[in-house]
Image: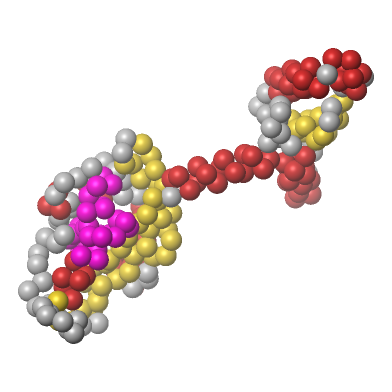
């Protein structure tokens, strides 16, 4: 969708009638794209966008954005960093590749990744063309996978893998800044007897209750891990 139409499209012969102009092909390609595509003038004001862009922000007509800059909308405040990035593109031709930012859309803050490049006419920059895609769900899935990888499924505490990664960070902080820490090892006396006498389901419940106690005592001032069996660690 455009605020102004291009009256001089080129043509591409398909070998069959009718002749299809490249303007028609381009317009259809832009509208078919799942990416949110937009273009702006040199003052960072919108000149047009595709249907995916409008749908993302709950808009119906391209005229709702034409002639306006990002900071005029609720979806983004137009931070100094974002303005500087686009100004560098429009002044020096520095393209934007995979620029990640937060944006307000669909009633919540979401994560997007943006790509933009300058538009040249007779070797002069007259505007920019860009697109973005939503990566909010990707971030959630990545966070979920990381949680699975570093969490003990029975107790909800960090597991041995998380302990190894975390203790390395504490050691590094000590080496660089001499910030010391305490390391506490805990095990449950006679735990094998509980399992042998009452069964593994009872033993699992014991582990969960001990883990809850450790988590409650540790609070926000330390890191609690189950490193195996009935063995726990607190880094404080």
In the image, residue 50 sits, relative to residue 177, either above or below, namely: below
Whether residue 131 is visible, yes or no, is: yes
Instruction: Answer with the quarter of the image where residue 174 lies.
Output: top right
Q: Quick check: 233 left or right of 79?
A: right
Comparing 8 with 95, the one in front is 8
Residue 63 on the magenta span: no
Comparing 17 with 34, the one in front is 17
Indicate the position of residue 90 as horizontal and vertical percent values: 29, 68
Comparing 21 with 139, the one in front is 21
From this viewpoint, which residue is outermost toward the left? 7
Indicate the position of residue 207 as horizontal and vertical percent values: 78, 22
Q: How is the image coloured?
A: secondary structure
Instruction: Answer with the quarter of the image where residue 4 lies.
Output: bottom left
From this viewpoint, which residue is outermost toward the top? 198
Comparing 207 with 67, the one in front is 207
Residue at left offset 22%, top offset 60%: 31
In the image, residue 30 sits, relative to residue 155, either above or below, namely: below
Residue at left offset 66%, top offset 27%: 220
Whether residue 81 is visible, yes or no, is: no
Q: Which residues are magenta?
A: 28-57
In the image, residue 14 sits, relative to residue 89, either above or below, namely: below
Residue 44 on the magenta span: yes
Residue at left offset 26%, top offset 53%: 52
From this viewpoint, which residue is outermost toward the front? 16
Q: Quick check: 100 left or right of 185?
A: left
Indicate the position of residue 162 as horizontal and vertical percent values: 72, 41
Quarter that holds the N terminus:
bottom left
- The tally of labels here is 0
Quarter that holds the C terminus:
top right
Q: Quick check: 161 left or right of 128?
A: right
């Amino acid at each position: 969708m455009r605020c102004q139409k291009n009256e001089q499209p080129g043509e591409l012969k398909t070998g069959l009638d009718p002749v299809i102009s490249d303007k028609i092909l381009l317009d259809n390609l832009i509208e078919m794209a799942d990416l949110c595509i937009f273009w702006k003038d040199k003052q960072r004001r919108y000149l047009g966008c595709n249907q995916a862009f409008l749908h993302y922000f709950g808009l119906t007509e391209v005229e709702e954005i034409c002639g306006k800059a990002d900071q005029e909308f609720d979806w983004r405040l137009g931070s100094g960093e974002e303005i500087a990035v686009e100004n560098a593109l429009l002044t020096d031709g520095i393209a934007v590749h995979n620029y990640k930012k937060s944006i307000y859309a669909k009633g919540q803050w979401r994560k997007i990744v943006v790509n933009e490049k300058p538009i040249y006419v007779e070797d002069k920059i007259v505007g920019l063309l860009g697109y973005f895609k939503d990566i909010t769900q990707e971030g959630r899935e990545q966070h979920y996978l990381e949680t699975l990888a570093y969490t003990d499924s029975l107790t909800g505490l960090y597991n041995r893998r998380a302990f190894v990664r975390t203790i390395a960070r504490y050691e590094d902080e000590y080496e660089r800044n001499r910030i010391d820490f305490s390391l506490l090892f805990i095990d449950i006396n006679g735990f094998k007897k509980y399992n042998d006498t009452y069964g593994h389901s009872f033993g699992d419940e014991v582990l969960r209750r001990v883990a809850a106690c450790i988590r409650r005592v540790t609070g926000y001032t330390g890191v609690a891990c189950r490193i195996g069996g009935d063995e726990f660690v607190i880094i404080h």
